[in-house]
Image (cartoon, rainbow, N blue to C red):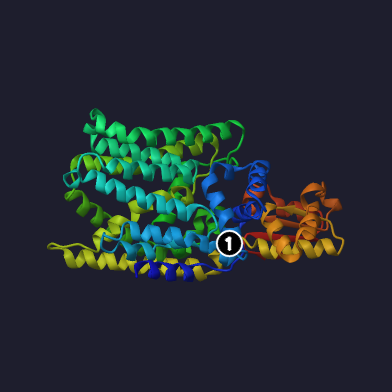
């Protein structure tokens, strides 16, 4: 019954809106006819997708075996991960509720990327850690397999998942340090450690070959803070990501809703965390905190040193750290039970409202690559010279849907023979101008060259020569 409820909520959360840049990269690779072609394209297009091979292979199988071709059908590949996320911790009262109203969880159900898989891996890690830390209910070290399996699950999700796996491993050891002195522990752990090292060796080799995420300046601690803003469920109550990225002041008109929501969600989380901590041993508390904080610090440092833009999706495995205390708050008892429950249910109200806004409001929609691709294709048919300032994988997918490989080949001119000067350009199509032209007044430059803004829609601007 619970699985059916999760599937129903997931189906409602999935939309038919356009794929954005990263989703296009997933589907274009998944469209390859054979595994051999898929791997060759993975290597050819480079980028960070090579560092999440298990998910990319899963996407390929979903496309070919299930026969999924549309945005909606492809995004349903997240439903098994949503069900696993809900069921694995279902023994904890109110977990299914807070999970299925979480804006963060439901947002990534509507995204053809590995983040629902990572959320499920994080839930598995939380469940295994809870059993491992509760030593009074364990027989020997049988819980080692559950913790190690969840760590390997995290590692195979992506390279960032490996950072979270390291946090889980350290947290598990800190919560029960006596395990290091027991041969029974090492007999169970060593096979898993070998598999983890093999996966780590693969990542190290691929990074040495130059496969990594695109570096973005000014990445680091502020991006981690934005990620926490997403995870707490506030994103749907505030400005869209594009607005927020352009200016932090865009939150001001939304403060009337963000402030009470933050107070309720934060208060409920604190009440739940205190309730959990009071019934947990000191070592277990240390282990749980380290399992979350250590990867956060690691990602912040990586973001600064490698110009890697850490955002909410990279923190996906940590979502149980947000939701479990909220579930604990709803189970509150004691002299302040009424106040605690009032705050907890108010937090649920704001989270549900945020989830609905993320699903329905235009300001939270994906970059509309579908519309931009149609504009570019129509312009090329009219013989216009198009300067395409955006990713090419998603346009290839939409071109294929329009007319198969002939149209895909036709739009290659956007990349292979792009205009080199505005003087020879008829149309400029720009995705996320604030990132494409960081610190540069591109609008004044276009206007000086007699271009006029022809259209503005989610994530894009279109400028036409007049």
Quadrant location, the C terminus: bottom right
Image position of 310 (left or right of 131): right
Residue at the image position 34 percent from the left and 38 percent from the top:
169
Of the pair 238 and 296, the residue shown nearer to us: 296
How many neighbours does mark 1 have within 10 angstroms: few (below 14), some (14-19), or many (20 or more)?
some
Residue 294 visible to the viewer: no
Of the pair 269 and 292, the residue shown nearer to us: 292
**Secondary element type, mark 1:** loop
Image position of 43 (left or right of 128): right
Residue at the image position 65 percent from the left and 55 percent from the top:
31
- State the residue lying farthest toward the left: 335
Give the quadrant of residue 215.
Answer: top right
Residue at the image position 35 percent from the left and 44 percent from the top:
292
Number of numbered discs: 1
Of the pair 260 and 43, the residue shown nearer to us: 43
Tell me if residue 354 comes above or below residue 413 in the rendering. Answer: below
Residue 129 visible to the viewer: yes
Q: Please provide percent x and percent y for residue 10.
A: 45, 67
Q: Please provide percent x and percent y for residue 55.
A: 52, 50
Tell me if residue 285 comes above or below residue 351 in the rendering. Answer: above
Q: Which residue is mark 1?
A: 366
Quadrant location, the N terminus: bottom left
Image position of 173 (left or right of 422): left
């Amino acid at each position: 019954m619970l699985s059916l409820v999760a599937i129903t909520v997931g189906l409602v959360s999935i939309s038919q809106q356009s794929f954005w840049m990263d989703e296009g990269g997933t589907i274009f690779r998944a469209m390859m006819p054979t595994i051999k072609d898929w791997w060759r394209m993975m290597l050819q297009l480079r980028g960070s997708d090579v560092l999440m091979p298990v998910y990319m292979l899963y996407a390929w199988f979903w496309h070919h075996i299930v026969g999924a071709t549309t945005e909606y059908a492809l995004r349903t590949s997240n439903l098994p991960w949503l069900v696993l996320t809900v069921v694995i911790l279902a023994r904890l009262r109110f977990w299914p509720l807070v999970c299925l109203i979480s804006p963060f969880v439901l947002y990534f159900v509507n995204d053809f990327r590995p983040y629902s898989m990572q959320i499920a891996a994080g839930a598995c890690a939380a469940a295994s850690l809870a059993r491992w830390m509760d030593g009074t209910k364990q027989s020997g070290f049988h819980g080692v397999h559950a913790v190690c399996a969840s760590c390997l699950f995290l590692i195979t999700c992506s390279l960032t998942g490996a950072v979270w796996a390291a946090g889980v491993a350290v947290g598990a050891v800190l919560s029960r340090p006596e395990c290091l002195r027991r041969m029974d522990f090492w007999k169970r752990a060593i096979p898993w450690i070998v598999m983890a090292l093999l996966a780590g060796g693969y990542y190290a080799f691929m990074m040495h070959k130059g496969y990594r995420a695109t570096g973005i300046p000014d990445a680091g601690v502020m991006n981690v803070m934005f990620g926490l803003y997403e995870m707490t469920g506030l994103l749907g109550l505030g400005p869209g990501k594009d607005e927020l990225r352009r200016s932090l002041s865009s939150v001001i008109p939304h403060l009337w809703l963000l402030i009470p929501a933050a107070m309720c969600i934060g208060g409920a989380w604190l009440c739940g965390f205190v309730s959990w901590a009071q019934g947990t041993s000191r070592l277990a508390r240390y282990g749980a905190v380290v399992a979350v904080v250590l990867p956060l610090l690691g990602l912040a440092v990586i973001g600064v040193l490698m110009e890697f833009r850490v955002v909410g999706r990279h923190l996906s495995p940590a979502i149980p750290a947000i939701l479990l205390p909220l579930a604990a708050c709803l189970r509150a008892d004691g002299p302040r039970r009424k106040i605690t429950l009032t705050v907890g249910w108010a937090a649920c109200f704001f989270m549900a409202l945020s989830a609905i806004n993320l699903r329905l409001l235009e300001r939270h929609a994906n970059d509309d690559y579908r519309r931009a691709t149609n504009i570019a294709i129509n312009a090329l048919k009219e013989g216009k010279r198009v300067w395409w300032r955006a990713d090419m994988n998603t346009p290839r997918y939409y071109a294929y849907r329009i007319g198969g490989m002939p149209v895909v080949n036709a739009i290659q001119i956007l990349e292979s023979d792009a205009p080199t000067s505005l003087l020879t350009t008829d149309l400029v199509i720009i995705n996320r101008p604030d990132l494409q032209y960081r610190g540069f007044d591109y609008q004044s430059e276009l206007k000086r060259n007699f271009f006029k803004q022809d259209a503005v829609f989610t994530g894009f601007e279109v400028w036409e020569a007049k």
